[in-house]
């Protein structure tokens, strides 16, 4: 079961590493840029293969950044 969940954990670790290196605000900006690039790529069918994962990565990046930001302010 751990093997099946490893890709999701690896994405979480990668996002955490990005936040520690760039900061939360820059993480939000990077997420928006990834989403825009993903939307632009999904216009073509071949680009959708790369565009859809970019959109998902952008959404995950923004969601994680906003979640960490709110929990940090409530302390």
Image (cartoon, helix red, strand yellow):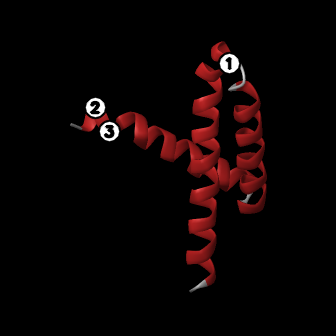
Q: Which residue is mark 3?
A: 5
- At a point 56% along the width and 42% down the height, the residue shown is 14
Distance between the Cα atoms at labels 1 and 3?
Answer: 27 Å
Residue 40 is left or right of residue 69, and the answer is right
Judge depth for marks 1 and 3 and give the one in front: 1
Q: Residues within 10 Å of mark 2 (few under 14, many from 20)?
A: few
The residue tagged 1 is 47
Q: Residue at x 58, y 85 (%)?
A: 74
Q: Quadrant of the C terminus?
A: bottom right
What secondary structure is marked by label 2?
helix
Location of mark 2 (residue): 3
Q: Are marks 1 and 3 in contact (CB under 8 Å)?
A: no
User: Which corner quadrant of the image does residue 37 belong to?
Assistant: top right
In this image, 7 relative to 54: left or right? left
x, y (%) of residue 32? 75, 48
Q: Compared to 2, does 29 lie above or below? A: below
Q: What residue lies at 57% left-to-right and 58% top-to-bottom?
A: 64
Residue nearest the viewer, comparing 27 with 43: 43
The answer to whether residue 25 is above or below residue 73 is above
Q: Is residue 30 left or right of residue 73?
A: right
Quarter occupied by residue 48:
top right
Between discs 1 and 3, the one toward the N terminus:
3
Q: Do the numbered discs 3 and 2 sit on residues whose CB atoms are within 8 Å?
A: yes
């Amino acid at each position: 079961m751990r093997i099946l969940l490893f890709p999701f954990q690896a994405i979480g670790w990668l996002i955490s590493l990005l936040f520690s290196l760039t900061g939360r605000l820059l993480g939000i900006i990077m997420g928006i840029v990834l989403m825009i690039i993903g939307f632009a790529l999904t216009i073509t069918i071949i680009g959708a293969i790369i565009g859809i994962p970019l959109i998902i990565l952008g959404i995950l990046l923004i969601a994680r950044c906003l979640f960490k930001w709110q929990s940090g302010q409530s302390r």
